[in-house]
Image (cartoon, rainbow, N blue to C red):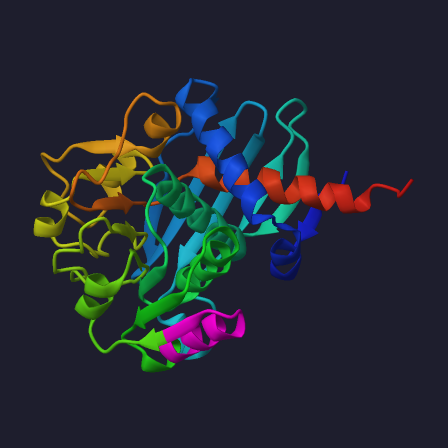
Amino acid sequence: MVPAFIDEGQVLKLFSAEGLVEDVSKALINLHRGLGNVPDRVGIHVKGNWWGLMFGHVEGFGVAVKVVNMYPGNRARGLRTIQGIVVFFDEDTGTPLAMIDAPSLTGLRTAAASALSTIVVKAPTEVLGFIGAGEQARYHLMLFSKLFKISKIIVNSRSRGSALNLASQSRSIGIDAEVADDPSVVVSRSSTVIAATTSTKPVITVKPREGSHVISVGAPKPVVEVERSVLEGASCILVDTRDGVLRESGEDFGGLRLVELAEVLTGEESCRFDGGYTVYKSVGFAALDLAAAYHIYAAFKATKQPSS
């Protein structure tokens, strides 16, 4: 059997925002209950650029292997900064079923997990802030606009051109947009803030407003997005995986209480504003890729079924 190749265009046509978030949630719960195995990610640097190998199995979802890299300099070359491939296998036979474009799958699964964090803390999304306006920001806007009521976005980026492009994308789907010259403006005026950068210095340095939610997806080291004082002031810090964040994040989480997203989804823990603000940190791990690959392949397979 020759595995299907599902490119970026197909991925973007096939996904359902609600369905993807549901599949990510179920996969996280299954894994947390011991129904799977996700080893630590293997990472190396090639000429200063990061490469990662990620492998994971969750019962009922299958097996996925992702090879991915991050080349920040590609932006100046007109190329993707994140590249790679996800191979999706049948868990019962080991048969490779599909090869899926990794950048789009990574963007969607990261945004889906961020959306889950927003849902479980019941964060407001009327004004959505973006610090960083690259690929991850675009995927977050794409997914969040399908899931939440958003009246406006405020965006800041080191590249004003990228910020203007994201603002244009927002307006094209009927959401007002404003470009801010300083990240602190985004933090102080947004209901939920999404930091998606490659910065090696904190971009969230001021205290977020009461009742707001901060999402940081810039990772791994040496990326640093959230200042230690902001982390210390949070009512709750959610993470995709505790071990992954402590090992791979550039931020200093030492001595802070971290609550895994799966722990909240299963009801073992709670994460509330309690008069302050919440933070979600993600470094990404294979269970998210697997859930997204499962979701996309199921949708792809459905399109190949003969109509009745």
x and y percentages locating residue 178 in the rendered image: 34, 76
Tell me residue 212's x, y (percent).
Answer: 24, 51
- Residue extent of the magenta highlight: 163-177
Q: Residue furthest top?
A: 34
* Residue 171 against residue 128 in the figure, above or below: below
Answer above or below: position of 117 versus 262: below
In which image quadrant can residue 190 be found?
bottom left
- Give the residue displayed 31% in from the left and 34% down from the top: 241
Asked whether residue 136 is in view, the answer is yes
Residue 300 lies in the magenta-colored region: no
Q: Report the side of 151 relative to 289 (left or right).
A: left
Taking the image as shown, residue 37 lies to the left or right of residue 22, namely left
Which residue sits at x=18%, y=51%? 210
In the picture, the quarter occupied by the C terminus is top right
- Residue 199 placed where, x, y %? 23, 63
Residue 185: horizontal and vertical position, in percent? 20, 69
Front one among 133 and 175: 175
The N terminus appears in which quarter of the rendering? top right
Left or right for 76, reference 102: left
Q: Would residue 164 be counted in the magenta stretch?
A: yes
Which residue is at a point 60% across and 38% down the rendered structure image? 294
| Frontmost residue, 72 versus 182 | 182
Q: Main secondary structure of the magenta part?
A: helix
Pick whichever, 238 or 235, lies toward us. 235
Quarter assignment of residue 193: bottom left
- How many numbered marks are there? 0
Q: Nearer the viewer, residue 71 or 111?
A: 111
Quarter assignment of residue 162: bottom left
Regarding residue 290, the answer to whether it shows in the image is no
